[in-house]
Image: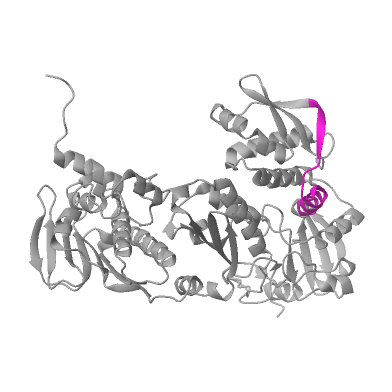
């Protein structure tokens, strides 16, 4: 007897189901896709116990006839495509014909549906290991799917589910993504009989975004780009988050994940958003279906874009334009010990939570210098000091410069401040293009073995960024030119750091990203360091140059360059008031 055997149907169905359904949230994702494809304008999601005991999705869409309902729960059955060519022009959310059969294989499944215009509905009941059963049933137009006892027959999968709270958060995230992509539809989500979301159809995307993230609608910046084959609609809010959970990408209304595009979104934000913070971004790409491939992953959240370089270039430009309108704002400082009193000033984007232990000041739009610096009035409404009113009082920890003004003290991080100055000076000197200098002795470097092919394929992108590399043997490259702003005798040090960070941080090999990343690296390596001793004249000159920068409050990495503590705050700490 041979060693190869055909798997029983029950086994391969559960294996296939595991590729599509890996948790309650993926059940909700697939059922929402079906409801949206059915044209529903009201979708109700109900779950209990994190979706482990019950998931119900009800819609008022077109519904199905009895014979179609029975076919729908079988494997490889779909109404979305007919031929291979249909995959090239796919416009529906679902298409594989695997979701319902996969859910049936791992749960107690009930589907009740009635096609619009028919007098009665159909009820389909399915349990793992048994064929589906069909019977007439009373039903409103539309479809209701009930999924109970998820993964009861797969205890190994069930034990890896998270806590109810964690699973509910993942389910909510799926509902939110669909609600953003389809603002004209209504969505209700209830968990353990507790209303979580109740979204009426919105008139536009901004209204839906504000409904899901209250407060963002007041300061959303909308930028549109339209080029041959695709259109971009970018919404950016000056609110920030400590992670990327407030950044959403949609392609033809389908929520997707694309690391390259996320990098393109966040690259222009470096040095504007505080370190570790990310702006709320909602990116909508409308593109010819023939130019994308959505059949990449069973979860359908990954795609391939044919004009990816043009899309990324347009997106980068849109984000930069949106950032030019971001303003800074004042949020009350709250000290756990001293109460709510004027505290340290720091310029950051407007929407940082009030609980942050710093005092945020207002500022003019990015790119504009405060008018008070021209008048010498001491401080502006934005909290930017004038060097004419500062008295240098020394340096502590060989890193922080201390200045006194009339009603406050200013602490400056000398490295971060100098880094910002050099970054903007180098940026200005390079202009739209990149002036380069040829190295007398090429610098040799050996990339990781798995990155050699990528480096070889992107030689032109490096050259456009001012870094000309040439293959040297089968394992290494020579750097023969670098941007002209790199200081003399620092070329090897800066190039080594650049490639070390390039490999470690996964920077896309695109000319614009490489240019910005090298600029940031060069500024960092060239700036004064911790331990470098500055005299009074040098310290005052440094601060004067800093206040003359377009973005004086943050270094290119997003760390603060200075903070201010008011006299009132210090007196409060010492119980003098």
Quadrant housing residue 194: bottom left
Q: Quadrant of the C terminus?
A: bottom right
The correct choice, above or below, for 348 with respect to 414 in the image is below
Instruction: Name the residue rendered at 61%, 40% in the picture.
Output: 509
- The magenta segment is 419-441
Q: Position of residue 93 (x, y in %)?
A: 35, 57
Q: Position of residue 67 (x, y in %)?
A: 13, 58
Is there any visible trace of residue 241 in the rendered image? Answer: no
The correct choice, above or below, for 310 with respect to 370 in the image is above
Q: Position of residue 127 (x, y in %)?
A: 12, 53
Quadrant housing residue 268: bottom right
Query: How many discs mark residues in the rendered view?
Result: 0
Nearer to us in this view, 547 or 140 = 140
Q: Quadrant of the N terminus?
A: top left
443 sits to left or right of 154 = right
Nearer to us in this view, 346 or 153 = 153
């Amino acid at each position: 007897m041979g060693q190869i055997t055909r798997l029983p149907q029950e086994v391969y169905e559960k294996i296939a189901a595991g590729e599509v359904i890996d948790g309650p949230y993926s059940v909700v994702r697939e059922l929402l896709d079906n409801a949206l494809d059915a044209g529903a304008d009201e979708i109700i999601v109900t779950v209990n116990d994190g979706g482990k005991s019950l998931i119900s999705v009800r819609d008022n869409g077109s519904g199905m006839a009895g014979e179609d309902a029975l076919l729908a729960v079988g494997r490889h059955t779909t109404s979305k495509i007919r031929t291979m060519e249909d995959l090239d022009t796919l416009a529906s959310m679902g298409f594989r014909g695997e979701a319902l059969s996969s859910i049936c294989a791992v749960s107690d499944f009930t589907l009740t549906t009635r096609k619009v215009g028919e007098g009665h509905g159909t009820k389909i009941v399915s349990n793992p290991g048994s064929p589906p059963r069909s019977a007439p049933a009373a039903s409103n137009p539309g479809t209701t799917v009930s999924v109970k006892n998820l993964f009861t027959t797969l205890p190994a999968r069930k034990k890896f589910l998270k806590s109810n709270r964690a699973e509910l958060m993942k389910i909510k995230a799926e509902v939110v993504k669909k609600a953003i992509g389809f603002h004209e539809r209504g969505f209700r989500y209830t968990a353990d009989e507790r209303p979580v979301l109740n979204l009426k159809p919105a008139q536009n995307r901004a209204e839906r975004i504000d409904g899901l993230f209250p407060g963002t609608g007041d300061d959303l910046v909308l930028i549109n780009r339209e080029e041959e084959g695709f259109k971009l609609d970018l919404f950016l809010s000056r609110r920030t988050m400590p992670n990327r959970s407030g950044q959403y990408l949609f392609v033809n209304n389908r929520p997707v994940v694309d690391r390259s595009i996320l990098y393109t979104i966040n690259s222009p934000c470096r040095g504007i958003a505080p370190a570790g913070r990310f702006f709320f971004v909602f990116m909508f790409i409308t593109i010819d279906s023939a130019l994308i491939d959505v059949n990449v992953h069973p979860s359908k959240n990954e795609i391939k874009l044919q004009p990816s370089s043009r899309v990324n270039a347009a997106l980068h430009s849109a984000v930069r334009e949106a950032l030019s309108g971001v303003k800074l704002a004042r949020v009350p400082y709250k000290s756990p010990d001293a109460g709510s009193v004027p505290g340290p000033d720091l310029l950051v984007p407007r929407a940082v939570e009030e609980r942050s232990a710093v005092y945020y000041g207002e500022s003019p739009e990015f790119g504009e210098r405060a008018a008070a610096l021209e008048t010498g009035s001491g401080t502006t409404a934005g909290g930017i000091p004038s060097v004419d009113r500062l008295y240098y009082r020394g340096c502590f920890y060989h890193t922080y410069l201390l200045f006194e003004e009339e009603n406050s003290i200013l602490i400056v991080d000398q490295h971060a401040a100098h880094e910002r100055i050099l970054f903007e000076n180098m940026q200005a000197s390079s202009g739209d293009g990149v002036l380069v200098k040829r190295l007398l002795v090429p610098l040799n470097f050996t990339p990781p073995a798995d990155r050699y092919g990528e480096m070889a394929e992107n030689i032109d992108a490096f050259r456009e960024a001012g870094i000309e590399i040439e293959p040297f043997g089968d394992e290494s490259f020579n750097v023969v030119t670098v941007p002209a702003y790199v200081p003399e005798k620092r070329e090897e040090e800066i190039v080594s750091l650049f490639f070390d960070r390039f490999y470690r941080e996964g920077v896309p090999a695109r000319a614009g990203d490489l240019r910005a990343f090298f600029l940031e690296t060069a500024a960092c390596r060239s700036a004064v360091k911790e331990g470098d001793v500055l005299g009074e004249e040098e310290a005052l000159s440094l601060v004067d140059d800093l206040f003359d920068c377009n973005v004086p409050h943050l270094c290119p990495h997003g760390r603060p360059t200075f903070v201010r503590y008011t006299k009132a705050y210090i007196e409060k700490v010492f119980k003098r008031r």
